[in-house]
Image (spheres, rainbow, N blue to C red):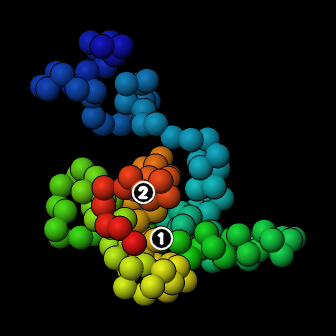
Amino acid sequence: SRCKTSERNPTDGGPRRGGGLKTPCQRSFSLPFLDEKRKTATMGGGEGPKMSKFLGATVPDLTPDQTAALDVVKSVRTTPRDPRFPSQNQANHCWNRYNEWLLCLKSTGGDEDGCKNMRQMAVSICPTIWTEKWDEEREEGTFPGIKV
């Protein structure tokens, strides 16, 4: 360990707890730019910055393209939790969401606008390389999932 024995808690071998100056073993990791934002936000006694505060704030001097891109970013959500896939490994959840999107396409006769939300849920949980590979396999006719 990089910590000196004198800096460790004698009961469990971990860093000492309590007041005083923090040693390198007791410091928590932080990013300087976030620390600055916290200092600025907490000067008035607040709890610190909230993500909703940043997303809801008006951003000056944006081009129409940048404003449209910001609106898209604000509206993107990840796939909701699915009790059928309780484990940390979400590969099966990804595969299922992709095939649910294909089922939607099949049932609507290829209406991509009607199945846009299903596609978004698949893309949000699957690695990009997988969805690109599956899209290519569908074009080639070698995709092992649902045929549209």
- Residue 103 figure quarter: bottom left
Which residue lies at the image location 27% right of the left edge and 28% below the top edge? 16
Work out whether residue 89 or residue 28 is closer to the camera in this orientation and state it. 89
Choose mark 1 or mark 2, whichever is in front.
Answer: 2
Which residue is at a point 66% across and 76% down the rendered structure image? 71
The quadrant of the image that shows the C terminus is: bottom left
Residue 49 in the image: above or below residue 28: below
Label 1, secondary structure: give it: helix
Distance from label 1 to label 2 (Cα)?
23 Å
Q: Which residue is mark 1?
A: 120
Residue extending farthest left? 11
Q: Amino acid at mark 2?
A: Gly
Badge 2 density bin: few <14, some 14–19, many ≥20, Cα 10 Å = few
Residue topped by disc 2: 141
Position of the N terminus by quadrant: top left
In the displayed structure, would residue 48 be above or below residue 32?
Answer: below
| Kind of residue at badge 1 | Gln
Residue closer to the observer: 36 or 23: 36
Q: How many marks can you see? A: 2
